[in-house]
Amino acid sequence: MLVARYTAPAYRAAWLLGAGHDADDAIQEALVKAFRHLSRFEDGSRFGTWLLCIVANEVKNLHRSRRRRDRLALRVGAATAGELNGVADSPEAEALADERRAALLEAVRLLPEKERLAVTCRYFLELSEPETARALGWPLGSVKSRTSRALRRLNAMLAPRLSPEAALDALDEAPHG
Amino acid sequence: MAEQSMRRLERELRELGGRLRGPQAPDVTATVLARLEPSIPPASRPARRAPARRRRLAVAAAVVVLAGLLLAAPGVRAAVLNTFRFAGIEVHLGGRHPPPDRARLPAETATSLEDARRRAAFPVRVPAALNAPDRVTVSGGTPPRVVSLLYRPGPGRPGAIRLDQFDGTATPTFRKYLTGGGQVERVSVDGQPALWFPFPHTVFYVDRDGRDQVGAARLAGSTLIWQAGTVTLRLEGRLTRDEALAIANSARS
């Protein structure tokens, strides 16, 4: 059943875009709209992308009408054996990667709203720049500029914060003459 | 930002996206099909009026608190030797030429202490160990991102003193480049950890998008940085460590 097949990706997209507990309302609206116009789409792969655009739009409408946003509540799923591609990292390397991911997610959460939406569409939902522009109703130029601003900001936010002790150790260990 | 680190970040974001899980998706098939009814052939029509399953997810929102994770593992330190943050200041080791030695912060404008206090979104501290500041400036937009108190040289004070304060939580406001030798020292202000940089170094103002503002770069003298609540303070001038600490410890909002 088509509806069932597209529910999970649509729901995930709504959740990533910050719909929170209104995510089920948003996807119901989006699915109804998408299937009403199903005849326009014969290519299944494009339908998925098109649906995500409608979901993004519904989430935006929700935000506009309620004038509030739910805190982006996400968790990082554990890597499955398949995701690791059979390459076993050392536990230390894996722990380090987990921390980096956690810090990155927290940094995304702290981005200004529009930059966060750009990052969500471009990287989490893997939409192209034109698709992101359509999904968010922005000019293409805004997608590009907000995405690159977001990347610069994330880079700055990810510089590790050290305690003074650790900072001093780092200074002692690094040649900076 | 280097092209390379931009690409690394993009790769990491895609990989992170692949791992992000929200709650279990609700089963909306029945509701959606019911609403689509007129366009569905009678043969496949589902049972009418399946109950909507709203709000069943209320308990599903697992919020994971992620803050503070970076500090824990000893392995992290080795990986990040070249850059770190303390309070709202990012410190880089090496890699920059000294900038021109006189520069202003973006849109830096003179005002009164009362006005700066009214406009700033954080409590502005004034050191009791110094007299009233000779000049007060605000910079970086509305509300001002940075409030600076400036003191002219005078009796018993060989050089000018500058105290910058800013809310230093999400993104760094200043970036220091340490290219010369010299020992950074761990000290404390009001019982809180602080760092003393007893040698000249390059300081850039970082804009809200995380970019160095080259026009606002300058060579800083000895500098003490510390944090009070969410506010980062940096005191700069021709001061000994003990003079700087006495001034810092007397700062009150």
Image (cartoon, coloured by chain):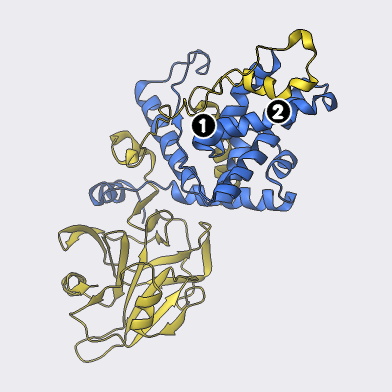
Chain colours: A blue, B yellow
Please state the total of marks drawn on the protein image: 2
Query: In which quadrant will I find the N terminus of chain A?
Result: top right
For image coordinates 78% across by 27% down, the residue present is A36
Residue A32 numbered mark, or none: 2
x then y, percent, for residue B86: 32, 54
Q: Against A47, is A163 above or below?
A: below
Secondary structure, mark 2, is helix
Q: Is residue A97 left or right of residue B86?
A: right
Q: Label 1 is found on which chain of the structure? A: B
| Residue appearing at x 66%, y 21% in the figure | A6
Q: Amino acid at mark 2?
A: Val
Badge 1 density bin: few <14, some 14–19, many ≥20, Cα 10 Å? many
Seen from the viewer's position, the closer of residues B75 and B189 is B189
Measure how far apart labels 2 and 1 are at the Cα level: 30 Å
Chain under callout 2: A
> SS at mark 1?
helix
Locate residue A124: give its quadrant.
top right
Q: Which residue is mark 1?
A: B16
- Looking at the image, can residue B2 be seen? no
B23 in relation to B158, above or below: above
Left or right of residue A118, residue A89 in this image: left
Residue B66, given in percent of the width and then of the height, sits at: 37, 38
The x, y position of residue A131, in whole percent, is 73, 38
To the question of a shared chain for discs 2 and 1, the answer is: no
The residue lying furthest to the bottom in this view is B155
